[in-house]
Amino acid sequence: MRRSRGAAAALALSLVGTGAGIGLGLVAPAAAITPPVAFTADALPTWQPDGVVWALAEAGGQVFVGGTFSAVRPPAGGAGSERPAVNFAALDAATGAPTSCSLSFTVGSGTATVRALTLSPDKKTLYAGGYFGAVNGTPVSSLAAIDVASCTVKASFRPAFAATVRALAVTADTVYAGGDFLTVAGQPRERFAAVAAADGALRPFTADADEPGRAVEVTPDGNNVVLGGDFFTVNGTNTHALAVVNATSGALTKAYPGFIETNSVVKDIATDATGFYTANEGTGGGVFDGRIALDLGDLGQRWRDTCLGATQAVLPYRNVLYSASHAHDCSSVGEFPDGQRHHLLAQPTTSTGKLGWAPDTNDGIGEGIGPRVMTVGSKGGVPYLWVGGEFTTVNGTAQQSLTRFASTGDTGAPTVPVASAVSFKPGEAQVRWRTSLDLDDSALTYRIYRNGAATPIATVTADSLFFRRPQASWTDTTVTPGQTYTYRVTATDAAGNTSALSGTASVTVPTSADAYPNQVRADGAQQYWRYDESALPFVADSSDGGNRSGVHLNAPALRQTPGAVSGGSTAIGFNGTDTKVYGDQRQTVGSAYTIETWFRTNTTRGGKLFGFGSNQARGSNQYDKHLYMTNDGRLVYGVYTGATRTITTTGSYNDNRWHHAVATQGPGGMTLYVDGVQKGTLAVTTHENFAGYWHAGGDSLGGWPDRPTSEYWAGQLDETAVYPTALSAAQVQRHHALATAPADAVVQLTAAEDTYANAGAPDGNYGSSGSLAVRGSSFYASYLRFDLPAAPAGTVLKSAVLAVKTNTMSGAGTTDTVSVVPVTGAWTEGGTTYNNRPALGGPALGGFAGIPEGSAVHTTGLTTQTVAAALGGPYGLALTSAGTDALWLWSSEAQANEGTPRLTLTFGAP
């Protein structure tokens, strides 16, 4: 429904294309940054003004800063002290510190401001526009020329503008200005004018507009001038916000009636060798807030980026268009939905698709816009991107109104991956993680480490953007049934910056297939959320290759037990107020689909269990293909076809028991099943067609029949799946039946006691040692005791696996065979020595054929029948060797409490 609104090998993922080509810059982009981006996202220390920056320009390694401020101060932690800077500062492009050039722009009454800065083609003269009456005491009238070499006002340049100058463009002999003025030198010139570059004499150029001018840019051939602003007419002709005029006369070359929405304006214009680009801002509903690229050949549109968020500045550089805005909704171009503001973006000059560069500011002071202007300044052959505006933070750190980014020296590491692991059948474990965020690298390399080893077992490459962070995964096909494995993942960018290791993801490989999840996968689920995660915010997709993960919002309750299906899988709990899960990947839904979930609740306020919506964290404007509960516990399945079409159960299901809901739509219409039984059908084969995200636990429900008190779900969900087909009644019934099918139960035990005996210290006791040792000569033996549970009713022991971890000392591994044997004599952790060590039995229960160097977990299966005979009581094991190369392990007393001896028991049906 539409809510009322305005208009075993590495897996390589490639999500974003990149372009290349010849651009305007002379220095190649840094190799450490994902092409074609040319700048890092790491903000450099830069002196900062105490007000708003409106204008930037660069010449000779200096960056000139204009705005409304009175002083500049060092960055946090930087050397120096605040110094006066009246609406103008000159800073070193490479260091960000003030140069010797100091100018004060003042006015007799009102507030002086510098709104525009531009350099002559030879970069010897700086032109400054704004609202001011003097520069360093020399009288001027809102437009001044500054000799760059001497940093002095050119007294010979004396144009007279009667009001604020907001935009400037310069050729070798002419200065073009736009702003609020109606006269220049006493002659009528409404909002746009041209004066001689040498002395400021008024040119015959006439391009009168009915509202303020905000942007002026000369085309590269010098024949035309592109005008932008608030206007609706130029020289009496209808052309709102944008026009192209003759550079000599001001006569219209190209008008744009109806091209830009009437409640939107052009704030900035920039050109490159092939086109010109507009930055647009609007107010009210149905605005245009984004960017337009137009070709110089025919002055027609190349593309239009309809993101919402008041674009203030555009800067083409090396075939990339950098923009300053507070973009908050780019769903209209297939990107992020309405939500968080993003203030700095990059995209190819050939298309609207965003690139992997997204440093950020806040909205800041004043109008709360954020960044307003950008320029590239170079020094020593290194380009720097400078950004000015009214922000007060950059990348979350305090920095006011001015910042810069280098083209070299990327130092920011990707965020730490959030990983999980799962195994549904013998011989296979899937490791999956939410791809990391790196603000200047979209192509990242992930390394997977198993059992604490220092060398990765696999490497995966994947692309991610700040608004598109899909799941990546890798399947380990070298695992042994019954054994437990741990995995950790790192992310590395092209510069070699590497994240910390992810949290440990642990998985026990089953000895037989897990019936329910294997059937869901076999039936073609393309998104499958099992809710087994133990850490926020990642919800793993357990489908076979779908990689359509989710994100927790406001911390739902994790690992709720018991889950809906037999086995160790857990459920997720929602509070009915603000918690939910939303999809990480924007997608569309075909004409046939199935949504399936298990639910349990006793709520009397209803809520949405699962559905499709146009937004992520915020409530959706479009929403259908959903399951929701009424206040009295009835279940509703609905789609929107221009009207709401629903199937509603007669019975209630808020009885605090697990129930199975399946909703299908396809050529046969809509069907709702509950607990394997068909509850209703509807001959409706269509639904609302839009791109969006799946939600669990809540989303919009405005306008739907029997709308509950709450749009959020108070209760538990489990085993939520989406299929690209309509499941049959037989498939639905099979899923319902399999939920109670016997599943393996896994019990992990830590050694209750452990110690070792040392022939070199016959009377020594090592019960409190953090390490264990094994060697044949001179003798070491390690002893472990586990308190074994009895087998759960109706099950038998299917496997027993011992895991130990080598410690971090040099030479902890061994080339010798280590055997695991039963202990037949009596012993205690605190009393065992070499002299009174217990007797050992046989045959060996398991063993290790050598253990390599490096701290890592190693496992061995034990003879199941022997261990089974000891269930229900304490059981002792010993690690022995006949060789001379010692093995050193962590004990249960190790301070790290990681990798201590563990015994994993798997119980299942006989």
Image (tube, helix red, strand yellow):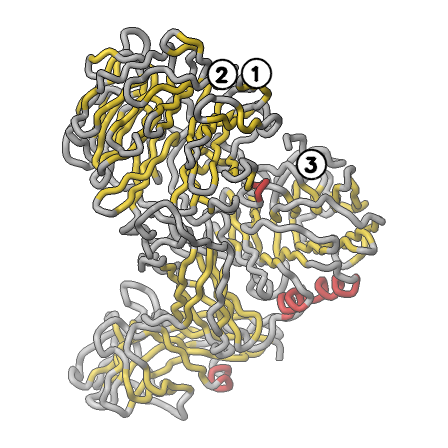
Looking at the image, which residue is at 58% across and 28% down? 256
Residue under the image location 67 percent in, 33 percent down: 3
Residue 461 as seen in the image, left or right of residue 424: left
Report the Cα–Cα distance between label 1 and label 3: 41 Å
Q: Quadrant of residue 57?
A: top left
User: SS at mark 1?
Assistant: loop
Residue beneath label 2, please?
208
Q: CA distance from mark 2 to mark 3?
A: 43 Å
- Viewer-proximal residue among 62 and 780: 62
Position of residue 704 measured from the top left corner of the image (x, y, whole percent)? 73, 36
- The residue labelled by disc 1 is 236
Instruction: Please tell me which residue lies in front, 579 or 501.
Output: 501
Where 644 falls versus 782 (above or below)? above
Q: Secondary structure at mark 3?
A: loop
Q: Secondary structure at mark 2?
A: loop
Q: Which mark is residue 2?
A: 3
At label 2, counting other C-alpha atoms closer than 10 Å, the crowd grade (few under 14, some 14-19, many 20 or more) is many
Residue 877 is situated, as x and y percent measured from the top left of the image, at 37, 82
Please name which of the two marks, 2 or 3, marks the residue nearer to the observer.
2
Residue sitting at x 22%, y 16%: 155
What amino acid is labelled 3 in the image?
Arg
Q: Are marks 2 and 1 in contact (CB under 8 Å)?
A: yes
Image point (49%, 26%), residue name: 245
From this viewpoint, is residue 642 visible? yes
Q: Tell which circle, 1 or 3, labels the residue nearer the N-terminal end.
A: 3
